[in-house]
Amino acid sequence: MEATLVVTGDAVSAAPAPPAPAAPASAGGGAAAPVGNAPAPAGAPAPAANAPAPAAAAAPAANAPAPAAAPAANAGAAAAPSSASVAIVNFAYQPSPLTVSVGATVTWTNQDTDPHTATSDTAGVFDSGFMPKDKAFSFTFSQAGTFTYKCTYHSNMHGTIVVQSS
């Protein structure tokens, strides 16, 4: 007959089993260590060898398919930048036209000695206001479309921003 191990929390104890032959006492006079399959004496800690092995964590099946990688958006196509700069130089916006993605921030910087603006041709979309030399103005484009703009001080200055959806 075999003894049945009972596990409760961290304690391991043996259920009643037929008596095992007595093991010789240890040299120190303490409780004898169990021999073979014999249960530990009452009150003695069970050796680790009698403890059941913890259950192994479930491993994925060897033939389980690997997770599929997400396809790259617009693979092979050059993406429009998420931020860009326009220089105001010699009474012109450079570059123009400029193409960016939805969500891109465009920053205009006046490098001329004369003041300029970057004002949307569609009222209320964006307007830098007065920009003296070295002043910058930024605007984030949240919608796709073509946005034309001008300098309110100089009627010959026009620019275009093309905003593409991602």
Image (cartoon, rainbow, N blue to C red):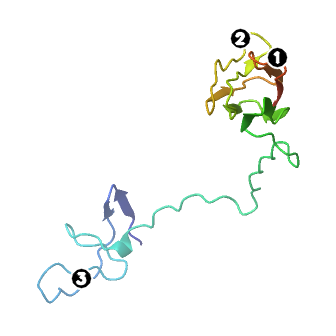
Q: Earlier in the sequence, mark 3 or mark 1?
A: 3
Picture layout, residue 16 above or below residue 97: below
Picture layout, residue 128 above or below residue 105: above
**The residue under label 1 is which amino acid type?**
Ser
Residues at marks 2 and 1, CA–CA distance in whole angstroms: 19 Å
Q: Residue at the location (82% across, 23% down)?
A: 157
**The residue under label 2 is which amino acid type?**
Gly
Residues at marks 3 and 1, CA–CA distance in whole angstroms: 110 Å
**The residue under label 3 is which amino acid type?**
Ala
Picture layout, residue 123 above or below residue 5: above
Q: Residues within 10 Å of mark 2 (few under 14, many from 20)?
A: few
The residue wearing badge 3 is 22
Q: Element under label 1?
A: loop
Q: Position of residue 5 (x, y in %)?
A: 38, 64
Q: Earlier in the sequence, mark 2 or mark 1?
A: 2
Q: Earlier in the sequence, mark 2 or mark 3?
A: 3
The residue wearing badge 2 is 124
What quarter of the picture does the N terminus occupy?
bottom left
Name the residue nearer the viewer: 149 or 79. Answer: 149
In the picture provided, is 89 more to the left or to the right than 42?
Answer: right
Name the residue nearer the viewer: 139 or 96. Answer: 96
Could you tell me if residue 99 is visible in this image?
Answer: yes
The residue wearing badge 1 is 155
Q: Position of residue 140 (x, y in %)?
A: 68, 27
In the picture provided, is 39 more to the left or to the right than 103?
Answer: left
Which mark lies nearer to you, 2 or 1? Answer: 1
In the picture provided, is 36 more to the left or to the right than 91?
Answer: left
Q: Residue at the location (14% across, 90% down)?
A: 27
Q: Residue at the location (88% across, 45% down)?
A: 77
Indicate the quadrant where residue 150 lies: top right
Q: Element under label 2?
A: loop
